Image: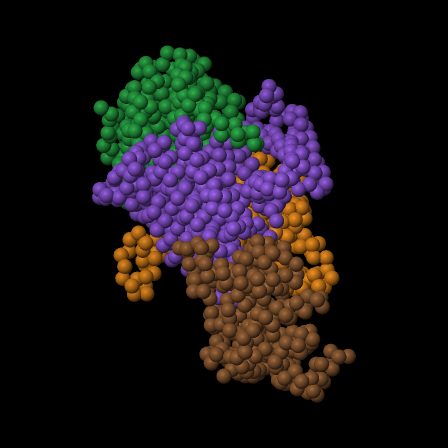
Amino acid sequence: MSDLELRALRKSFGSADIIRGVDLAVPAGERHAVIGPNGAGKSTLFNLISGAFPPTSGEVMLGGERISGRPPYEINRRGLSRSFQVTNIFHNMSVYENLRCAVLWSLGYRYTLWRSAAALKDAAERSREVLHLIGLDHARETPAGLLSYADQRALEIGVTIAGGARVILLDEPTAGMSRAETDRAVDLIRRVTEGRTLLIVEHDMGVVFGLADRISVLVYGEVIATGTPAEIRGDPRVREAYLGEEAA
Amino acid sequence: MWTKIIAAAASVGVMTAFAAHAQTVKIAYIDPLSGPFANVGDQGLKHFEYMANKINEAGGIAGGKKVEIIGLDNKVDAKESLIQFQKAVDQGARFILQGNGSSVAAALVDAVNKHNRRNPDQRVLFLNYAAVDPVFTNDGCSYWHFRFDADADMKMEALTNWLAEQKAIKNVYIIGQDYSFGKAVAAAARSMIAKKRPDVKIVGDELHPLGKVKDFSPYVAKMRAAGTDLVITGNWGPDMSLLVKAAADANFNVPILTYYGGGLGAPTAMGSSAVDRVKQITEFHENVEGAPAALMDDFEKKTSYDLYYWRAKTLMEMLKAAADKAGSTDATAVAAALSGLEHKTELGTVTMRTDNHQLLQPLFISTLSDKVARTVEGTTLGFKTDYRIEADATRTPTTCKMERPS
Amino acid sequence: MEVVVFSLLNGLLYGLLLFMLSSGLTLIFSMMGVLNFAHASFYMLGAYLAYAMGGQIGFWPALFLAPVLVGVAGALVERYGLRPVHANGHVAELLFTFGLAYLIEEIVKLFWGKQPVPYRVPDVLSQPIFTLFETTYPAFRVFMMVVALLMFGVLWLLLKRTRAGLMIQAALTHPHMVGHLGHNVPLIFMTVFGIGCALAGLAGVIGGAILVTEPGMAHSLGPIVFVVVVVGGMGSLTGAFVASLLIGMLQTFAIAVGASIGDLLRLVGIPVAPHGELTGITLAQIAPMLPFLLLVLILIFRPRGLMGARET
Amino acid sequence: MTAIDRALPAMRPVGVRSSPLAAVAPWLLGAAILLALPFVFPSRTGFTIMNAIGINVVFALSYNMLLGQGGMLSFGHAVWFGLGGFAAMHMMVAIDKLALPVPVFLLPLVGFAAGLLAGAVLGWPICRRAGTPFAMITLGIGELIAAAGLMFVTVFGGEEGIKGDRVVGPMLFGLDLGPQGGVYWFIAFWVFAAALAMWAFTRTPLGRLSLAVRDNPDRVPFIGYDPQRVRYLVFMVASGFAGLAGGMAAVNYEILTPQIFGALTSGNVLLMAFIGGLGAFYGPILGAVLIVLMQSMLSDYTEGWQLYVGLLFMGLVMFAPGGLASMVEGGARAVRRGDWRERAPAWASGALAFAVLAAGIVLLVELAFRAHGGGALRLAGLTLRPGDAMGWIIGIALVSLGAGLLRLLTRRGHDGDTARPA
């Protein structure tokens, strides 16, 4: 069964159709990449899936349950977590605090006000784990806003996966990074998404082809092809619409 | 500034040190000295300081003690007044002067009552020179509170005495600010008009929120539509100036009977729009027959205000008389002497009632005019007397059941 | 009939005064996102300056000079006060204007004292201009209406028909885009702020004479101006115009009707005691509070305002 | 517009690893100060002022819960303060009339419950918006409640308010609430308890999340929390503590008037919290102390105290948005880093320049105030009249000297006492 499924998803802003009927099924455990030229609607697609705004029509199914139309926090609680293209973390809070806030709900703490956050052993343990996983042990008490760009991106991923979501959406996690930083980021993504379902939007073709089990190509709000990296490389429509330009 | 704050903080600690000096009799004046009503508070303060000086020049009270007025800023806030009250007691003041705002007065009456009960050795008197809610000399009366201004009911009593003779007036419109004073004026007007002029119709009885109305033209339109011959209002400040201006703009020429038409700044704000239109009921205005010209000239020269609070003079003179009579400046002794005290002023004899500690004094209805001898606030306007009500005619029944100290 | 006609006239007058006061704030708020707490303080400055200058050079020159001076003062405040604070975000800006309103009031008291000043219109304008149902209508009120309508017309034309206006229009609806067009955004902000303040100053020159010129005049009008801007909607001059008239009429007619809450309830068939504490409250009593009720309701149910281009 | 600004100082991240002693030390110090104060200022005035400060400390801390912690700028915080106060006052009257066996000492809890309840009811629509619309709604609600306060005489007693007597009901801890000194211990207890509770709140999961909402409300839904819900809950708790402060006021003043709902009260608490500093938990305490002193003591010396408050506020908004607390923090950081010796000269010169500037401003303002009422300014044997040029010249010289010095110092890039916390 597919972990994440999009059915005839559409979104228009006024008269502009941004997403024009997308069908996509991502099986559990698959690393799936979405590529496409600028303005193809990749970020809008992520916003629809994560509930940032509702689709005009169509549905998003998570583990067989319809999640489209629900607010983002409910979608998150059902096990889907996303990162953002522009770093979206809590700048004035320490790295550790960022992570601890991100793990709370998944550990069953609601809007709790009768316990000390510092005394929650499981939250502390999980936060430390993630801290170690993203390699920021040394920066535990640093305010997130003072981290280097690459570290901020790592924290972005950490905040996204900290809650233990089954389905992870990463929006251009390596944008703006150097080669070496990108390699480290890919390695990190590989490790933190082990055994989970991943949907990733990425411009760096090296990353995409190195990481993804399957790839979908989004052009002008439509998926024109879905397949393994090899199939996509060989697809003439893809070459024409997208890869051709990239290669040139 | 910082040094001042530190000085202020330090003085909290040492203040008690000043308390005991009894050579001067300290009188705390608790009224707004900053904020929107600071001008009114300052005007009052200048009156009392001037009158205190007069008394000191004439040899002081109770065998040569000097009086000193201490100005304390209460920002017309009840809570802040209580803070200033405690400061006043600490500084050795056993007499409190206050007048602006019935809410403040109510808080102070209550505070003085509690204080005198809890601290019988440091009793304090509250000398109210302007808060006119009738409650202070009726259900809410206190042995420690003395009022030197006629209350809202007494002024209405006087107004309706005049109205009883004005047979041409058939329709009266009452408008006031939506708070205790405005309501008290309206209630008094309704009951007393019904008693003295049952033929007069009250064609409008309106309350509007305090200080929120910018354009009174709609109200004036209603007044005109109702065929109004006389408007009665307890409004003060901008609420009164704006009402008068709106009436003038609409060429609505009926008299507007006010409580505070001569209040500080009002003649300036209303200007010529108020001439022959605005009437006031007060215990004094500068063109009253018998007003001491030399005193008014000297007062204006020294303070740059017009003499407005005649009752400040009456109050200070009566305080002196009471202290002299008691031979002491102890609050309990002065209170006993003040209760029932009769006193002669240039305008007639005044009496402090024993049953509710309300001063009875002659009142005057006057109209703002541009043809008078003495003008106010540097304008060409001044008040001229229409009608005099004798002190005894202002007596109203009281519900006061005073608890007297044993 | 008489009451209706006069209520209309009075509502119109008050509404137009509100519009004069709030048009500048609409420009400022829409473009810079600054809900200027001190806007009514510039209105007060206009009144005081006109009073001060009127004594020297007469009313008519002051009518033009005072708003210009207020505008310059506004531009200086923007340049040396607001701009440095801008980096700290909207709350800091809001706090800045909050403090500024406080300071301007204190400074006005320092210069002109705490009492009302005798600011009057010239005799020409204080004559009655027409008589209706035996009530005269003073020329000055008509003059104020004409000025307000002219102001609306001129602003509207400037915004719709000139290059600078179109640019400001664009900035009103898409403030972040202006920078991309290569325009000098700080200069535009300063100019808009100055012009907005000048408009408030003009409202003060006229409003101060109709109402009372005293240090509390800004404080008492400040919140109402916000109501107009928020109810009218972000970036909409027409919205501010409509909202001003709406609030003017609402208040005036609420006074004219004079029914109590109990009366209204009984009108729709709910039998209640006529003089209870709640049911005895009349519309006239709560008239001045209606704008705030409107403000709260609009913000909760229609945050873009009546005609706003985008959410506040 | 909806995102609250990010550059205002945020609450300092609380060190998770700080030792137990470091966490307890400030509270021990606070308790010691509360115990010592009555012996330092034993006069009636001293108690009265300290009681007023105590009430405002709790009120300002509750305000900072909204603004400093939750990023909600409210212009109507007086509503909860007032409602809590009136609830406690009615209870106090009931204790007297019905001889209820409820100690007056516990009345702040009634205020807390009333504030919480009112915050829960009215907060529901209010918290549906954030940022500037939120601020505007609170302004509107504040005006409406203030007007209603005068209209409903049976509940709020009209202009003259409701009076009570605190010396009724059973005594707790053998404390006589009659004299001001007795009330002090009541106030001190509740200041300590409320501050501790509010500090504890910052450490709960909800407290941490409210920081997250303040920091970046757009991200919060994607970690599973509804930011609107977080704001609403914080709003309720803050209203509760404002109500508690109101309950303290009811006992202290024994009278409450609807004036309490006014814009002045709401504006004052904003001034206190901001001047003290939103960035540190103790900031509003400093602000409350300073503002109450200026309001109740400085007003004995000058009618211009409001102008000084305004100038102080504007100066901080422009040059030190972290408030007084940021200066304390700056000093503490330097001490921790151990470089305070190097910085001391810069601080001293900065303070000197500031003092010169302030002296000049004070001189000019005082002269200007005297220009209307007459009278001369007497200072250390020097008599300056507003009519003479002398005073003005000195004032202007001092201002230019101070401003010039400050400019020079900041140009040189000293991390002076006006630096903001990182």
Front position in the image: A182 or B393: A182
Residue D48 x/y as whole percent: 40, 33
Indicate the chain coloured green by its letter: B
Front position in the image: B378 or D199: D199
Colour of chain A, in one word, is brown
Front position in the image: D143 or C137: D143
User: As displayed, is residue C112 above or below residue A35?
Assistant: above
C188 relative to B263 in the view: left or right: right
User: As displayed, is residue D382 above or below residue C309?
Assistant: above
A209 relative to A99 in the view: left or right: right
Task: Look at the image and tell me whether residue B358 can be seen.
Answer: no
Residue at 64%, 33% in the rendered image: D348
Residue D374 x/y as whole percent: 56, 26
User: As displayed, is residue A157 above or below residue D294?
Assistant: below
In the rendered view of the protein, which quadrant contains the N terminus of chain D?
A: bottom right
Front position in the image: C146 or D164: D164
Residue at 63%, 34% in the rendered image: D351
Indicate the chain coloured purple by its letter: D
B396 relative to D364 in the view: left or right: left
Q: Give the mark count.
A: 0
Residue most extreme to the right: A248
Residue at 49%, 83% in the rendered image: A1
Colour of chain C, in one word, is orange
